[in-house]
Amino acid sequence: MLKKIIQNDLKGSKLVSLTTFVFILFASFLLSTVAIIAVNLNSSVNLFMENVKTPHFLQMHMGDFDSERMRHFAQSNEHVLDYQTMPFLNVDASDISVNGERFTENSQDNGFSWQSENFDFLLDLDNKIIYPNEGEIYIPLVYDTNGVLKTGDRMTISGLDFTVKGAIRDAQMSSMLASSKRFLIHPSDYEKIRSVGREEFLIEFLLKDPASINLFQGDYANANLESNGPTITYSIIKLMNSLTDGIIIAILFLIAFLIIIVSFLLIRLTLTAKIEDEYKTIGVLKAIGMQLSMIKKMYRAKYALIASLGSAFGLILSLVLSGFFLQNIRLFFGESEHKALAIISAVIASAFIFAVVILFITLFLQRLKKLTPAAAINTGIVSDGASSLKHFKLRKQNLLSTDLFYGMNLILTRKKTYFTFVLILIIASFVMILPNNIYSTMASDKFISYMGLGNGQAMMILAGKDSLNDLNSRLENDPDIETYAIYDHKSYEFMLDENAISKMWVTLGNHHLFPVLYTAGHAPEHDNEIALSFLNASSLDKKIGDTLTLIINQQKTDFVITGIYSDITNGGKTARATFSDNLSDSLSTSLVMNFRKDISIDEKLKSFEQAYLNAKVYNIKTYRDAVFGSTMNNIKISSVIAIILSVGLTLLITLLFVNMLVVKDRRNTSILKSVGFTNKSLHTHYISGSVLLVIVSMIFGTVLASTLGQSITGAFVQAMGVANLKFNIDKSFVFFIAPICMVAIVYFGTNLGTRSIQKIKVSDYIRE
Amino acid sequence: MTTIIEARNITKTFGQEKNQTVALNNVSIAIKANEFVSVMGPSGSGKSTLLFALGGMDTLDEGCVYINGVSLYEMDDNRVADFRRKNMGFVFQNPTMLPSLDILDNIMLPSFEDYKNDKSALTQKAQNLMKLAGIEGTENRKITEVSGGQLQRASICRAVLHGPEILFGDEPTGALNSKSSEEILDLFEELNKNGMTILLVTHDAKVSARANRVIFMKDGALESELYFENEDHQTRLVLINQKMSDLGI
Ligand SMILES: Nc1ncnc2c1ncn2[C@@H]1O[C@H](COP(=O)(O)OP(=O)(O)OP(=O)(O)O)[C@@H](O)[C@H]1O
Ligand SMILES: [Mg+2]
């Protein structure tokens, strides 16, 4: 009997059944894919980092290095398993050429190194340790995938030729978010080019127990060892490696979630319509003594079939297509060990979708319990009851035409029915607008100030303080420059608490000329004031007005915190102060400038590049594009996909919903026709309602996208150091294109969905 | 007297090939202005189908219908609907009211657009009609808050509010008790006296006795007719019943 019921059910509602199937299929596909990617990503990254033997603690250092003292520290410290120092030779892009052309990739610090002896290996694409021969060079994998360099290219570094033999996987520096990139060469080649670059040291420790990283970090800081540079730990390296794919996982998960919600709404919509349609039948079934569980089974049968097919096909699809999503993971980290576990997780994810759908339907059908046979049989046709409104009367209004009145009246008397429709439209407009908001925010000029760069037009970075005096007088006299400011970047120790010491990057200079974005307070003005980056302030748990003690030239000095700002440079942990200090070494010196209006910035920057060979010169916008370019591109693509998805969803739902209404209203349509309402009027009833609802939903969706959407996005980017992100919305899209698009689709869908009204004859539903 | 409705050779069939029913078989009929016509016949003889056909509410297989010389089936749907709204009123056996409006709004809905500038006059007129039909006081009620009889009277009020030339009724009193039924028929007579043409389908000889022309149908065709002028009620009943047994109805 169930088979018959299912067959009839499916026949009577092909479009709805198919749509429900497709939605469940997508939900299952996405969730299974998420499971597969997550398991494989975790496994691949772990395996890769095991092969690499990633250091647990890594201190970069520039300047003098006492290797004897370091060895002694490593040997005597209880946590250390192994220890090594690797050189990292910073070479300016201007000293590198590729096939005779100048090397253009200068948003990153390009450095050269040889293969490690004990751990922190640089691997090839089979995760094997590479030992290049003389004259051979291996390049960072991102440069290969970005097309900056390719195998076979000839790289020349200060007159010495290298042939690019392949790409390397680098656990520490592969992400574009890590600001340095490592090239691998033969140790004797390294000696030959040593003089052109500035040598930095990577002081690396492998610990006996990874859990003791924090303890060890304390020991290291207290031992007063070399630490002129950033400190990196195992967990940060793992996070950086997982981030890109992690974001994909998060996005897919979010979409899967939305699709499940929409499927629920869809099932709710169609099941409500069906139950209302069969109110009388259900009453009769109850009256003749059929049990509730049996009735529920009848209504659930079709969905059980659809849900099982949908989840199964979704699972199959995810198994077939997951290779595409795993490509990137395979390329950067290699194969995973846990392929079987990934498949099992995918099966569980699909089963979960099936279970959730069935559970939802079972709970929904619980309402049949309240239905008494008498009520069902008596009310019959008027299933949702008559429901005229107290204050909204045709005879008491002058504003609306009869048709518009009736359209509005329908909405107001059937709020419950329309509620689901409105919810879906709100989701659709939210999905349509949010990615666009994110993109327009990142593309806006203002976003640069979230990055902690100051709002100048160009930036120049000099290593050390060498040529500064000459530079100062030159800038002073340059007529093209309107304003400029020089910043000195130093690393200072500070008191974590009474006893513990840690290190902090501090930028010294005038912070009023090119202000960054302060989320609280203001830039430091006096010598005893300091501002902290958002991530620094939150990890140190400091507020405005608190004191921070720096150790400047062996002297503890107290600073008052005056401001907290958004910053993503140097891992988001920086500080800004105004005092001057000529005694301690600078990590680097940077320069921010604005030019006069009629100056071509790029040409001016070229002349700077030629004049200062050691300096890195950036147009700030170009810098932003280099760091965020691929992310922005991804977001742009997502936003186009989101628009297509929401347009499709809106059209589909409008069609289904309106179709359902038309079927439900057949009798009323006959009545209206019998008293002389034209087809045009009847269309107007539906269209006025739909258009009103889409406008209301659009308003809600837009508001949600810039409030809730802003908070969600803000929470994401906060981890990078961007604080208090405010959307910079593309007004023409949000207030013009998107609404017109949505209204047009709903209008079109309603028109299409109500076409069958014309075929309804008065005699069809009125005669007995 | 001018002819107000004229049907020429109308045929209407339902269903496909094998189980096809001929509901109307080549029927021609002319109804004059201000006539009160009653249509009788056994169940399934095609009475409702005829009524729907004359009112332009169904499609025809063959033939055509003229109202005041205008061919209904040559107009497009929208014009037929407009024409119907302005010139005709319909009452069906069961009340046909919209669940989302109260009683008075239901009554006023079809006429509202034409009387928009004179809203209060229309409201007044509707309330007078409701009083005449004996349902004053139910204006603000939902359609489930009144009895079936009251709802039927409201349907009649809606059908005649805009003062149509022709009133069609498909067993309008079929669901009412005899007292309510008499009151409704009194109302019809009153409307007929004031110039309205009335065409009713009924099983009830008592209803037909109010008409001045009774048409008998069988198997989709017109079988016979009776015309009344000054006969009293009792005589009419006898004549109708006699005809019915002659025809085996
Ligand atoms: N929609 C339909 N589909 C199929 N057959 C129909 C349809 N409507 C009417 N018929 C058939 O057409 C014939 C005439 O029907 P109609 O409703 O006009 O009869 P009637 O005289 O009004 O009967 P009653 O007194 O029972 O109302 C009947 O045989 C009926 O079965
Ligand atoms: Mg009938």
Image (cartoon, coloured by chain):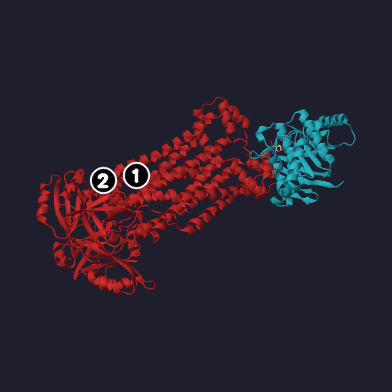
Front-lying residue, A684 or A222:
A222
- Amino acid, disc 2: Glu
Q: Residue at x 12, y 46 (%)?
A: A77
Disc 2 sits on a residue from what chain? A
Query: In the rendered image, what is the letter of the chain coloured cyan?
Result: B
Crowd class of label 1 (few under 14; some 14 to 19; many from 20; radius 10 Å): many
Q: What is the CA distance from the residue labelled 2 to the residue labelled 1?
A: 15 Å
In the image, residue A237 above or below residue A94: above
- Give percent across and percent down for residue B186: 81, 34
- Give percent across and percent down for residue A302: 49, 37
Q: Which residue is mark 1?
A: A35
Query: In the rendered image, what is the letter of the chain coloured red?
Result: A
In the displayed image of the protein, which residue is found farthest to the top?
A289
Residue A395 placement: quadrant: top right
Q: Residue at x 45, y 39 (%)?
A: A307
Q: Which residue is mark 2?
A: A337
